[in-house]
Image (tube, coloured by chain):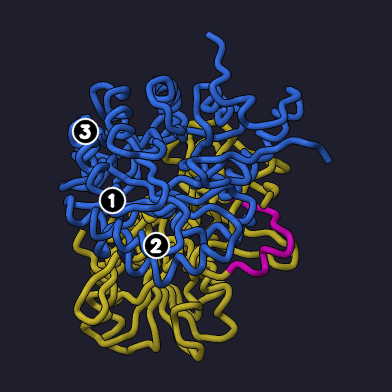
Amino acid sequence: MNDINMCVDICGVKLKNPVIAASGTFAFGREYSRYLDLNKLGGISVKGLTLYPKEGNPPPRIAETAAGILNSVGLQNPGVDAFISNELPYLKQFDTVVIANLAGNSRDEYCVAADKLDKVDIDMLELNISCPNVKEGGLSFGATPESVYDITRQVRNYCHHPLVVKLSPNVGNIKDVASAAQNAGADALSLINTLLGMAIDSHTRKPILGNVTGGLSGPAIKPVALYMVWQAAQTVDIPVIGMGGIMNGNDAIEFMLAGAVAVQVGTANLIEPTATVRIIDDIERYMLDNGLKTIKDITGGLIC
Amino acid sequence: MTGIVYSNDLILPSIYKMGIQLGDTAESILAGQFVHVRCGQSYDPLLRRPISVCQADVENGIIYITYQVKGKGTQWLAEQVRGAKLDILCPLGNSFEAVMPADIKEMWLVGGGIGVFPLQLLAQQYNDKADIVSILGFRSDEFKPLWQPFEQYSKRVIIATEDGSYGYKGLVTDELALALRAHKPQIIAGCGPSKMLKSLAYIAEQYDVPCIVSLEERMGCGIGACLVCNCKIKSDGEWHYRRVCADGPVFWSHEVSFDE
């Protein structure tokens, strides 16, 4: 129909289009297969994995805020071994890039789990050092340039897959953190994870979330995310994957103009299971309308 | 899918009953399942609203939901008129039928307040297969429109009101315990506030009657992916979080941990 090429290359991994389902909103894809053809997606970043199974935080785990949601799931997941034996074979049936998102409580846990994932057929490892909902580890690894450098370096030793480091917005200076990840050997960056927040019920005087605090996502955080992606993309030479409140193709294109080579779609999946596919179609239409042939014609194209 | 608003009537202060045309899908919805409704196109409210189905008119392809206006989402719903289009995911959830044994001949429905609606569809779908006794509790007789629909599907309806303005004065669970002293049904199905369900689970265990309950929790995706609506389910001496939206909302009451 047209000669538009939506493929993107992220450190040698070829994605058929720049739209990836974001970790924590897409489980392991099964639930969404009833609503969309997973083969259409550029990639799937699976639910955050830890070395051992994790039950997560007490409910309620979600609070709706103005144009956003707070969640405090706390990395509930079946553990790396169960992922490898039960979920990965399912995902490998599809022609889409599989990104294993890895979190942990300690350096050792990250490394042992990364080693396990190194031996299986995933396409990329996304190092999650930015989950705000776990008491130990998670965000603390992503909070400073030093800690980011250290954990990235450690995991890099065990990871021969392309390594994406997912950055937290809850930091002093995103540029320093982005540089630290690059210097420690990251092949790409993804950002932003959720912003720390809370919601209070004025009638009961209690926090709405069982965990008291949570991570804010959705359209409410898009301007913050765009800014941070723009800053990071200017700072590093490695590819940047942008995310934070992308609800439609136009949002995705804004992230690419700010410097992202690809995008992740998270909260939108919770509202509309087919959001990713619609966004892919939107991007294609934008390219067609603007006479653009490749995604490269968009990425970093911000005029300012 | 797209549903078309067929009716949207205020039946009690702040409580509406909405008919939604869903075509052939109406037939496939089982009691205990819910619809996940997008309330407008804006980002505020952002999330869908999960609402259980209370009645089905299979012949005309219409399902009914009853909802209380509590916030922006339900306020938007209340403003919709006949012919309006609704973005709906359905049917979601496991249903009562998926949990309970197949050969039920006698079932007691125990519900409280505005949580009784899933039981209404259960009564409708089972009254030709089983003898149904509905034991329902409300604050006062003002809530009569909520229990009236149970009358045509139940062999007997027992009402408890907190203020004694209708039926027995007291809690629905007290009425249940009294009734169980005289007779034990094959199964109890319950729905209502978690405090009531906790009490129901206790009583059912005391009288050794199998009991299933439909739970509610704040929800995200509604399809089992985001893991925000979890409840604690016990098995083999351990508990695990299970998804209310996809593993439930109906569970055996003795498996639910109501400690939260």
Assign a secondary structure to mark 1. loop
- Horizontally, residue A268 falls left or right of residue B87, namely left
* Residue designated by label 3: A143
Going from N to C along the chain, the mark reached first, 3 or 1, is: 1
Assign a secondary structure to mark 3. loop
Density class for disc 1 (Cα within 10 Å; few <14, some 14-19, many ≥20) is: many
- Specify the amino acid type for callout 3: Ala
Q: Chain coloured yellow: which letter?
A: B
Q: Is residue A204 something one can see in this rendering?
A: no
Q: Give the range drawn in magenta.
A: B18-29
Q: Write down the chain letter for disc 1.
A: A
Q: From the viewer's perspective, is residue A268 above or below residue A45?
A: above
- Horizontally, residue A270 falls left or right of residue B235, namely right
- Horizontally, residue A267 falls left or right of residue A205, namely right
- The quadrant of the image that shows the C terminus of chain B is bottom left
Q: Is residue A172 something one can see in this rendering?
A: yes
Q: Colour of chain A?
A: blue
Reply yes or no: does residue A230 show up in magenta: no
Same chain, labels 3 and 1? yes
* Residue designated by label 2: B244
Looking at the picture, tell me which residue is in the foreground, B203 or A172. Answer: A172
Residue at 27% over, 24% down:
A176
Looking at the picture, tell me which residue is in the foreground, B25 or A87. Answer: A87
Residue A103, label in figure? 1
- Specify the amino acid type for callout 1: Ala
Same chain, labels 2 and 3? no
